Image (cartoon, rainbow, N blue to C red):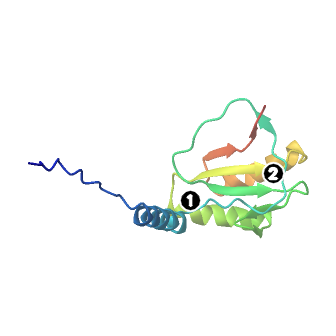
Amino acid sequence: MQFEGRRRIRTHLDMAPLIDVVFLLLVFFLLTSTFMVQEAVELRLPSATTAAPVERQPLHVAVTEAGEPHVDGEVLSLQALEALVRARVAEDPELAVMLQADARLSVQGIMDVMDRLRAGGARRLGVATVRAR
């Protein structure tokens, strides 16, 4: 008399559908993510050894070596900059302004822009720098 032994059932896990789902999720997250875009103004920022994070999104004002203020890629005069800041401060009294001045810009040029920002009502001013290495 011959007994039948236990038959082992082998299971097979197909990896192709799992890989398809992983790649679809990867494509989904890449397409739905947002990327930060920086100003297109050519600046060399000065360096600093300390930095503090910002809670809100400030108004970025970039100033070239020639002293031309740029906001959202648009060149403004100092009078137009003051009017823009006055309008933005009317909307948000706690508006923070981040000044990105070229390192080659004179201190007087920076002070002229800062005076106009304060005349427009901006009380929270910051100066962007590059972290020293």
Camera-side residue of 1 and 66: 1
Please tell me how crowded label 2 is: few (under 14), some (14-19), or many (20+) other residues with Cα within 10 Å.
Answer: few
Relative side of 89 to 74, left or right:
left
Task: Identify the residue under disc 1.
Answer: 89
Amino acid type at mark 1: Val
Name which residue lies at 73% across and 29% down.
49
Please tell me how crowded label 1 is: few (under 14), some (14-19), or many (20+) other residues with Cα within 10 Å.
Answer: some
Q: Quadrant of residue 39?
A: bottom right
CB under 8 Å between callouts 1 and 2? no
Q: Position of residue 122 (x, y in %)?
A: 62, 52
Q: Position of residue 83 (x, y in %)?
A: 67, 66
Relative side of 96 to 48, left or right:
left
Q: Position of residue 50 (x, y in %)?
A: 68, 30
Name which residue lies at 55% across and 63% down.
34
List the single residue furthest toward the left.
1
Relative side of 97 to 41, left or right:
left
Camera-side residue of 20 and 58: 20
Dot label at residue 71 = none
Amino acid type at mark 2: Asp
Camera-side residue of 82 and 8: 8
Relative side of 125 to 111, left or right:
left
Instruction: State whether residue 63 is above or below residue 32.
Output: above
Quadrant including the C terminus: top right
Of the numbered discs 1 and 2, the one sitting upstream in the chain is 1
How many numbered circles are shown?
A: 2
Q: Position of residue 14 (x, y in %)?
A: 39, 62
Task: Identify the residue under disc 2.
Answer: 112
Name the element at disc 1: helix
Name the element at disc 2: helix
